[in-house]
Amino acid sequence: MAQIGVDEWVAQSEQRQATPGGPLGSAQRTLERIPFIARLALVAAAAATLPMWTDSDYTLRIGVNALLLCLLALGLNTVVGWAGLLDLGYIAFYGFGAYGYALLSSEQIGVHLATVPAVAIVVVASALLGLLLGLPSRRLLGDYLAIVTLFFGQVFVELVLNADRVTLPGSDSPISLTGGSNGIPGVDAFQILGWNLDETVDYYLLLVLVVAVVALLLEMLNQSRTGRAWRAVREDPLAAETMSVPVNSVKLAAFAIGAAIAGLAGSIFAAVQIGVFPANFETQILILIYAAVILGGAGSVWGAIAGGLVIGISLELLRDPDQASVLFYAFVAVTLLAAVRPWRRLGVVVAVTVALGLVTHAIAEAIDPSLVAGVPRAEGWLGDFLDAWLILPDGDTRTIGNVLFVVLVVLGIGTAQMSARLRTAMIPVLLVLGGMVWELRLVDEPSITRQLLLGALLVVLMNARPQGLLGQRRVEVV
């Protein structure tokens, strides 16, 4: 029986947020019983064994880039996920840290500080810069704060591009601080307690340690009064202030801590790359960091790490057309499994999709064999199936690929407006058309394909699981 004066939907929030039943729920509850530090130590130890399994510098480089993205996602999660502040200038702190370390550890201005003092100076300076940028957050929220921080990010790029002829006080001739478009090459490698980091594997192991330590510190902070204050400000700043939470100080702390982590990541990046360049800190990198936070689940330490690993590794795999094909079709299969219910409906959709492709392929081959003379990029059984399933003309297919891409987008938008029954009926058509567009155009355009697949992944996830992979569901009263 309904109780008067009780919002049952809100009252049952804990029940809705409870872990699912079955083996998945049992496994999740078992993991939650293990202390955070123990789980983190196990994951870090497992990650540190990667050099034992491979000696490929390319593979380790992918690991370094993914861990850098994890570190940046952890910092951004502090500002966006916990404090709820939309910071679109976050990439500037990353660049500030990289250029700061480069200036303190190269021939650019003739300074070669030891690694630990140089990194410490960069981290503290980044935190102070974050504190300054956070000052407008005392009065600005939402879109207004986003515009101000986005402007800061663009100003940083312009400064590093144009600060190649700067006349300092007391100097008669200009000097190059940032190297302009040429950047700063020849940055010193890290040297920590007698450990010279000269190889990619050294930086990989260092990043495993750094990500683990930062994650532990942030989790401890999240469980403290500061973390609770951040979440209170995120949900309702006015209510938080009424409850004596120092809202302005809490916001500034979030900006400073996030900026310090980004500066730390930037200094490591500069040493890994042995140089810094303006193109390393453009808006595309900011999009990837946000994608990692959203994908993993805003407000979750584990989510930031998981999102960084998924985005970082997936984007690298998409550089290779053969690996990209396997990843693309795997993504399509997982999306179907997650989105189409019940299972019998999924079986019908798959059967109709296979039949539609085989029939259209046979018709096209009967009309003109050259229409199916093309070869798919995938190999093995997948390549054999695609060869018999898709219409792939031989020769230059860029024009037809572009046309089919436009048709696919139009059909996709139209399908989204249909009823559930019609949407299900359109899935086989979209899948066959999507396979053709992939093979004829997208597989050979890795830079475009990576952005499209990333966008598609986020759209699918936000519809299926709005809180991200490891984020916690939030109760909102409208």
Image (cartoon, grey):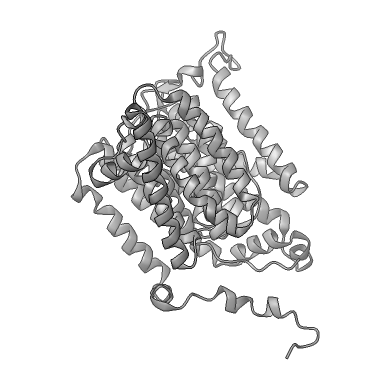
Residue 436 drawn above or below residue 423: above
User: In which image quadrant can residue 230 be found?
Assistant: bottom right
Residue farthest along the bottom direction in this orientation: 1
Residue 382 can be seen in this image: yes
Q: x and y percent of residue 29 in the render?
A: 43, 76
Query: What residue is rendered at 48% in x and 75% in y?
Result: 20
Q: Position of residue 75 (x, y in %)?
A: 52, 49
| Residue at position x 50%, y 39% in the image | 452
Q: Nearer the viewer, residue 474 or 88?
A: 474
Q: Farthest residue toward the top?
A: 172
Quarter of the N terminus within the rendering? bottom right
Whether residue 293 is visible: no
- 104 w.r.t. 465: above or below: above
Quarter of the image holding residue 41? Answer: bottom left
Residue 374 percent coordinates (x, y): 32, 30
In the image shown, does 476 or 239 lie closer to the viewer?
A: 476
Seen at 49% across and 43% down, the residue is: 454
- Residue 17, percent from left and from top: 56, 73
Q: Residue at x 47, y 64 (%)?
A: 345
Instruction: Pick whichever, 293 or 212, lies toward us.
Output: 293
Taking depth in this image into account, of 422 and 464 the one nearest to the observer is 422
Tell me the quarter of the image containing the C terminus. bottom right
Q: Is residue 269 left or right of residue 146?
A: left
Q: How many marks?
A: 0
